[in-house]
Amino acid sequence: DLICGTLGALPVVYQDENFNIIPFSLFEQPEESVPRSITFTRTFEDMLFEAESWWRILEFELGWPSRVEYLTHDRVQVEDEPPTMLRTPAGSAVASTSKTSKVFVDGTHVTDQFLIRFTSPNDPLLVAGARAIRTALKLDAAASRYADEPVPLGWFTPKEDADPAEDDDIADILSDWKAARQARATGYVPAALDYQTAQWSPVDLQLAEQRQHAVLEIARCAGVDAEDLGVSTTTRTYQNGVDRKYALIDFTLQAYMTAFLERLSMPDVTPRGYRVAFDLNGFLRGNESERLKNYEVGLRLGLYGLPQVQRREQLPPFTP
């Protein structure tokens, strides 16, 4: 959510060569009846977990995609075609080095001109972080077992001279014992049984520390600051909120942002001379005092005029 939700909420703008913002439906609402942020968030989730995401083009406007359908990862199948044979000047046959493939959506072949494929520059998290994720799941399951059993560990043994119970009876005894312990902490052990307890507890097993380490490993795989996931690490120099946002963009989000924008800026999606960019003004904006100081400097240097300041602050135009 920290990665994909943040990226999905960022506005995307369509600009000409002079950086003027041009309204275009593909970047304002790619899917019909689906908010833009939902489509973008799902796209980034597939890029993060699966290393690729797919859009199918449904409508064109003046020859360019204007409406798409986000495709869940399980709906798309890619089949590599055998290499084609080429003839050298000497007449010998060699295999072509270029790879070709066919894409099927719900079992139906779809040509490239109706597809937009987003590829992540990073390995899929479900592959690169598979070991760390499995470890976290095992530790979570272990902690859940301890939460279900008020006594850390224990087992029953038959008393001396007592007849061992049948397997079915043992299962019933354990089920009754578990149900009774969930109802009250104090229990009664039948006269024919002895209850043995282990000499360690979840604290002794350091499950909390192990789970924190597992979260730290996943944070490393995802490129996320461990403290953003609630894991306390070593002390660091002071960072304000804007500095942390810049660090999040530079070291975590930038790879996905660049791959996403470069794909949408390719000539099969946007005309030559136009580009797609994220509008980071809202995400990186500081407090009001800092913003006004920056605007004052920008106005004095002539970097932008008052109407631009009003637009950045989402204020209605007015004459001072």
Image (tube, rainbow, N blue to C red):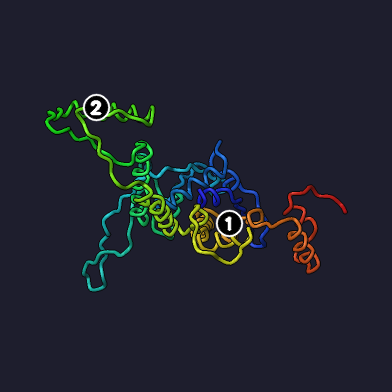
Question: Circle 1 sits on which residue?
Answer: 276
Query: Residue, x 59% and y 62% (percent of image)?
Result: 246
**Helix, strand, or loop for circle 2?**
loop
If the image is split into quadrants, where does the C terminus sit? bottom right
Query: Residue, x 13% and y 30% (percent of image)?
Result: 164
Query: Residue, x 43% and y 53% (percent of image)?
Result: 212
Indicate the quadrant where residue 84 lies. Answer: bottom left
Question: Circle 2 sits on which residue?
Answer: 190
- Front position in the image: 103 or 93: 103
- Front position in the image: 88 or 35: 35
Say which amino acid is labelled 2: Pro
Please determine whether, in this image, residue 265 is positioned above or below residue 70: below
Task: Please provide percent x and percent y for residue 91.
Answer: 22, 70
- Please give left or right for residue 248 compared with residue 46 in the image: right
User: Is residue 267 visible to the viewer in this orientation of the structure?
Assistant: no
- Please give left or right for residue 112 compared with residue 26 in the image: left
User: Is residue 99 visible to the viewer in this orientation of the structure?
Assistant: yes
Please determine whether, in this image, residue 235 is positioned above or below residue 201: below
**Crowdedness near tag 1: few (<14), some (14–19) or many (≥20) residues, C-alpha within 10 Å:** many
Please determine whether, in this image, residue 308 is positioned above or below residue 107: below
First along the sequence among labels 2 and 1? 2
